[in-house]
Amino acid sequence: MTEIQPEIEIRNLHKAFGERKILQGVSVCVSRGSTLAVMGGSGTGKSVLLKHMVGLIAPDSGEVWVQGKRVDQLDRSSLNALRLRIGYLFQGGALFDSMTVEENLDFVLRRHSTRSRSERMEQIQEAIAWVNLPHAAAQYPAELSGGQKKRIALARAIILRPDILLCDEPTTGLDPVSVRTVSNLIMRLKAERGITTVAITHDLLCAEIIADQATFLYRGQALAEGTLDELRTSPHPQLREFFG
Amino acid sequence: MRIWAKILDEVGAIATFAGMFFQQLFQRPFEGRELIRQMDETGSKSLLLVLVTGCSIGIVLSMQSRGTLARFGAEAVLPSMLALSVVKEIGPVITSLVLAGRLGAGIAAELGSMRVTEQIDALEVSALQPFKYLVVTRVLACVVMFPLLTIACDMVALFGGYAESLLSSHLDYRLFIDQAFSSLRLSDVLFSTGKTGVFGFLVAIIGCYSGYHVRGGTREVGQAAMRAVVIGSLLVLLADVMMVRLSLILFGS
């Protein structure tokens, strides 16, 4: 019987910045098409963990595997090829503020596709209609609300139709309606395209909507893993404090 | 001892950063569209500042020098003195210092805020080349535009000097031009203007380095902008001393 290869696997990851140890032996496994919520308080290394998955940060020790490739040992061109299969939704959206929404999406698309301008514009229109902001094309990021920025950032993250979506606090700072909107979009991606998702979140509502599995990080270590209900009912004091 | 180690570390990091510029300069993609946008940002948006600076330099230099020269009966050499001092030294250095303030701070603040809002990381994870797109284009734009803006500054300074002379002593413009340009050698003009390309490189590299490596938040962005102006201006002055020495070796006095 052949073993099913996980889409993302992190083995015994250690990372320190100077004297400060951020990750201390974290291991995570995400199977294809599933959604993992990485939870935990501030400063527990969640964003650092996510940045390892896309090669933005190199580990001190441990292994990072994505789609069967060891990210921390890839050369620049192989890493870039892998990055095209991964969408990344940044905490603040990270939209290029000197460009309109349309230019933000086209900037990525133009460089990685051979499509004509009219085909690209059609694809961009589809993407912004998918996040339910069909009239935002000519607007600048500064003219959008927090929730709208997140949705456009999501549209940009998936414009190249990636297999994996990494979300860093996708709903932080949003009102409950926007939290549901963004979380439902992430769910739709999974349902419609079978995307594998890793989402860092403090937000229980978001985690409830999107997560198949959850990992709880505490002081750079994975304290607990399981379904959200398993974590919620855990007798562990840190988890009880987190879930209130 | 520790502070020297820190300074040497910083110098090494800036040298490595500058080395990356040369390494990526001839690699594809060439980002022509962004280069033109940056040249426009650098050039057209700094032009008014440079013109006003040049004009005031020319007028003030002419006003201040006239009295002194008249005391020695040498008022006739005013156009030559004006042309030599403006074209050989004051124009290039003042233009570069003004641009170090405007562009050095602007570049550092822009890249710094892109860093803290994760826009540079967004370029990186989109498999684009942020260094090439953000740094190479800005540095190249400054290398090209600094000499062009210096030429504009020199011309306006000479015009300002002539306007002042016209009002003070009704000097004929043909005489002014003849005297002014007869004292200049082509090598003076080319070297003095060309050296501002080096100043542009230094200002842009420091601005990009300061902004690209910002860690933290808006406070650090402000500090990076200030550091870019201070280090950029100091490097312009230091490089000028070295290049004047070099010009004396190459072309004599």
Image: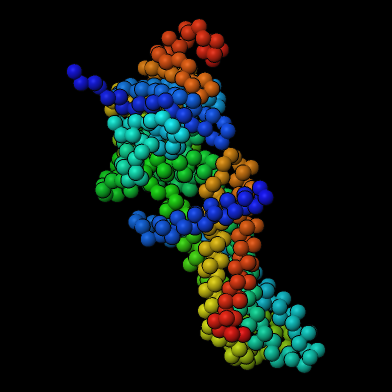
Residue A137 in sight in this render: no
Residue A220 drawn above or below residue B36: above
| Quadrant of the rendered image containing residue B107 | bottom right
Quarter occupied by residue B169 = bottom right
Q: Is residue A228 left or right of residue B13?
A: left
- The residue shown at (26%, 47%) is A115
Q: Where is residue A30 drawn, in percent x and y?
A: 35, 23
Way the structure is coloured: rainbow
Q: How many marks?
A: 0
Q: Which residue lies at the image location 33% right of the left edge and 31% below the top edge?
A: A66
Q: x and y percent of residue B28 in the render?
A: 34, 56
Front position in the image: A192 or B14: B14
Q: Nearer the viewer, residue A32 or A182?
A: A32
Q: Is residue B53 left or right of residue A190?
A: right
Q: What residue occupies the far right of the structure in this picture?
A: B71
Quadrant in which the C terminus of chain B appears: bottom right
Residue at the spot x=65%, y=52% of the render? Answer: B4
Q: Position of residue B174 (x, y in %)?
A: 60, 91
Residue at image coords 44%, 32%: A61
Residue B222 versus residue A5 in the image, above or below? below
Does residue A194 appear to the left or right of B232 in the view shown?
left
Q: Is residue B66 visible?
A: yes
Name the residue furthest front: B1
Residue at the left extreme? Answer: A1
Looking at this view, is B173 or B252 the one in front? B252
Q: Quadrant of residue B244?
A: bottom right
Residue A60 pos. (x, y %): 46, 34
